[in-house]
Amino acid sequence: MKTVYKKPECIGNKKPNSYCPGCMHSIVVRLVAEVLEELNVVNSSVMFAGVGCDGNGAFGYLDIDTVISPHGRALAVASAYKRCNPENVVFTYQGDGDLIAIGCAETMHAANRGENVTVIFVNNAQYGMTGGQMAPTTLAGMKTTTTPYGRDPKADGAPMHVCEILDTLDNPTFLARGTCTDPKNIIQTKKYIKQAFQNQLEGKGFSLGEIVSACPSNWGLSPLKSIDFINEKMLPEYPLGIVRDR
Amino acid sequence: MGKVVITADMCKSCRYCLTACKKDVIALASKSNRFGYKPVEVVNPDACIGCGMCAIMCPEAAIEVYKD
């Protein structure tokens, strides 16, 4: 029989998946594993995970060399590693609290330098691991544990759009936003991730794939209702598609 | 015709695969797996066309799909 789909060999060997039911982190990690296998770079790739659900869950589950960097500093560490070992495939795997809140400076400057690394950015609109606090990407009016009456854009700021912010810089090569709400979007997101890795292999420079993702546990929704939340609330704020492709 | 193989112990009962399957091949089981989640199981194998959409949607990579 012909194989239509089989689990990538580089996930789940050492440690089972520790993400909550319905968490889209696990879909993104799986897509990254599939892309690494398709490009045949599993053995030469190094993941730099941030602190949070991204690093906590992906470390060990994705069976490749992994560095857990200080909170927010994954891109700074990855930049240094890539400059010292340009033959290796280097990517960071970061959440929104890690990449744009605590690591805002590192992200901006790595993108501005056009470092030849790939960034996988999972945007679930709040801090997941620490219990659902407000992040820069939290939607206006969205309730979190630190904004119990909903995020007030006048007091707490408006949601930050990472792809659009980085699009104002000269050096990033590829910026795209996908999601994982249905098979069509997952296939499209995988194409974005693959292109982000291919750009690095071709030496084109900074590539970022943002994935609008669900956090059913902290949103207080069932996995299926969290998909509806993404479609109704998140996607109008974070439109899908390629923001920049050079 | 397709064949769906589900590793029940990896399933976390998120039901994403049920939204992806248009042929109602899979459904939630009544019995829990050893982690306490009710896994999906194949209930209508003859209807499977082997499209693989359930496997693409599965966060746990618990589903494998084969096709003749």
Image (cartoon, coloured by chain):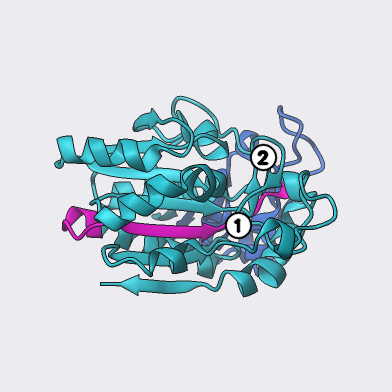
Chain colours: A cyan, B blue
Residue A151 in the figure: left or right of residue A17: right
Residue A153 in the figure: left or right of residue A174: right
Which numbered mark, 2 or 1, is in the foreground of this view?
1
Where residue B35 sits in the image (x, y, percent)? 71, 29
Residue at image position (48%, 47%) is A99
Could you tell me which chain the residue with mark 2 belongs to? A
Residue A27 in the figure: left or right of residue A215: left
Where residue A190 sits in the image (x, y, percent)? 41, 60
Tell me the amino acid under the disc marked 1.
Thr
Relative depth, front residue between A13 and A169 = A169
Q: Is residue B67 visible?
A: no
**Disc 2, SS:** loop
Judge whether A29 appears above or below B48 on screen: above
Labelled pair 2, 1 in contact (Cβ < 8 Å): no
Q: Is residue A81 visible?
A: yes
Relative depth, front residue between A181 and A151 = A151
Could you tell me which chain the residue with mark 1 belongs to? A
Name the residue that disc number 2 marks.
A20
Give the alpha-carbon distance from disc 2 to disc 1, as whole Å: 21 Å
Tell me the amino acid under the disc marked 2.
Cys
Relative depth, front residue between A165 and B8 = A165
Residue A94 in the figure: left or right of residue B45: left
Name the residue that disc number 1 marks.
A137
Label 1, residues with CA under 10 Å away: few <14, some 14-19, many ≥20: many
Where residue A70 sits in the image (x, y, percent)? 44, 30
Nearer the N terminus, badge 2 or badge 1? 2
The magenta segment is A199-216
